[in-house]
Amino acid sequence: MRSVKLCTLVCASVSLFAQDPAMVLMNQASGTSVNPSAGALPMVMTPAGSWSLSYMGQAFLDDTQQSGPRGGDKLYSSSWFMTSAEHSAGAQGAFQADVMLSLDPATITNRSYPLLFQTGETAYGRPLVDAQHPHNFVMALGFHYARKFGSAVWDVYFAPVGDPALGPVAFPHRASAIEIPQATISHHLQDSTHIADEVITSGISTGKVRLEASGFYGTEPWENRWTIQTGPINSWSARFWYFPSHRWAAQVSTGRIARPEVLEPGDQIRTTASLEYTRPVAHGTWASSLIWGRTHNTFSQLNLNSYLLESVLPVSRKNFLTGRIELADKDELIPQIDNSSAFRIGAYTIGYTRDIAVWRSIETGIGANFTAYSLPAPAKLYYGDHPAGGNIFLRFRIRPTG
């Protein structure tokens, strides 16, 4: 994949380990999360006077078809566009502003799209079950400052809307998920805080390690996805990163999220660990992620675990294979059942994308994926013995020049 190849060459030469404040900022994927520098997402990078600008964007037009009594069908589009501007701030410092926007509120009607066994957030005042909410129009609006002190770089991040130091790189920004249009069913157990409010993060990077901590407003966004939500800083998190080489990124994190679900009592304590690996191959970059996420509800005292393995492999310049395996504990699928216990759901996805030449500046692809599920016997009474889902989609992505 030409664009990933280009970004691999650029990003590998400006690794986080170089301890250049500007590169520490530009290497970030969402908030202060980081993909391995050998496999960062494709972006356009261009100078504008004394500023360095970068932007990237991606959209899917997706037709979802699902089987079983609770499956749904829908044609919808999901998208995001991100731009950032970086400028030096003295001899040892750098400043960066970034914004990320999505047209999901306009292109995902009725406030959700079908996704079997997905839970989290609300639509029309009711909990979403077997459906995924759209992202906010303003997915991120953040300001970074980094400064070098000896062999270390200290940075601070403030975002009216942003991503605190909790969890892996969120699925819309993750290199291993770039060819999969639908969300993970473990999203609300691993990386759902990627759109939070009033985020303040401070971190220190030195050598191959980074330590950071955040305060933020933890209640998840309202159903009005066009507005920016505000509230008190009532949640916290801390995250430790380790980067063995350009190809690897590992993190462990924990945090307490105050009232993350509007209709549910209690706070949530979330703990995550992840390992991302990217490997340059003949036709682009092979990206994979292994993620664990665990939540503890302080009201119900219930612990929910999730596990994810995900990969995208360019088998040729225009052909990509994708795979995702998930195991996720779900306690909201059957509202009439006492939520003191959870179902362990398995989701197994395989897919394929083919690039097609349509526009010179847009990487256009046509693809499909199929998901089979495993579930315990009590859940089969509501979902059927063999629920499944499929997606046929068009993918559009800004192509870097050069």
Image (tube, rainbow, N blue to C red):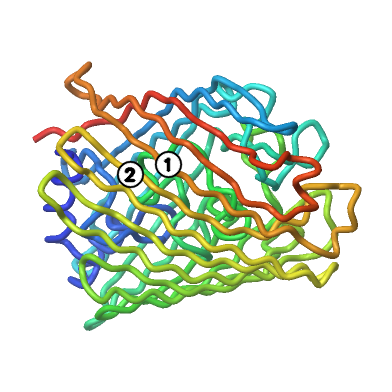
Please indicate whether residue 334 sits to the left or right of residue 10 in the image: right
SS at circle 2? strand
**Location of residue 218 by image quarter:** bottom right
SS at circle 1? strand
Q: Residue 246, position in %: x, y?
A: 21, 67
Residue that extends furthest to the bottom in the rendered view of this protein:
150
Three-letter amino acid code of the residue under disc 1: Val
Marks 2 & 1, CB-CB < 8 Å contact: yes
Image point 42% across, 41% down: which residue? 99
Q: CA distance from mark 2 to mark 1?
A: 7 Å
Image point 57% across, 26% down: which residue? 65
Quarter of the image where the N terminus is located: top left
Please indicate whether residue 383 sits to the left or right of residue 321 in the image: right
Please say if 123 is above or below 378: above
Task: Kindly identify which residue carries mark 2.
Answer: 84
- Name the residue nearer the viewer: 100 or 243: 243
Quarter of the image where the C terminus is located: top left
Q: Residue 156, position in %: x, y?
A: 43, 66
Please indicate whether residue 302 sits to the left or right of residue 208 in the image: right
- Tell me which numbered mark, 2 or 1, is placed earlier along the sequence: 2
Image point 79% across, 49% down: which residue? 262
Task: Kindly identify which residue carries mark 1.
Answer: 99
Mark linked to residue 18: none
Three-letter amino acid code of the residue under disc 2: Ser
Image point 14% across, 52% down: which residue? 281
Please indicate whether residue 401 sits to the left or right of residue 151 in the image: left
Q: Residue 187, position in %: x, y?
A: 57, 52
Residue that extends furthest to the top in the rendered view of this protein:
358
Crowdedness near tag 2: few (<14), some (14–19) or many (≥20) residues, C-alpha within 10 Å: many
Please say if 277 is above or below 360: below
Q: Residue 64, position in %: x, y?
A: 54, 27
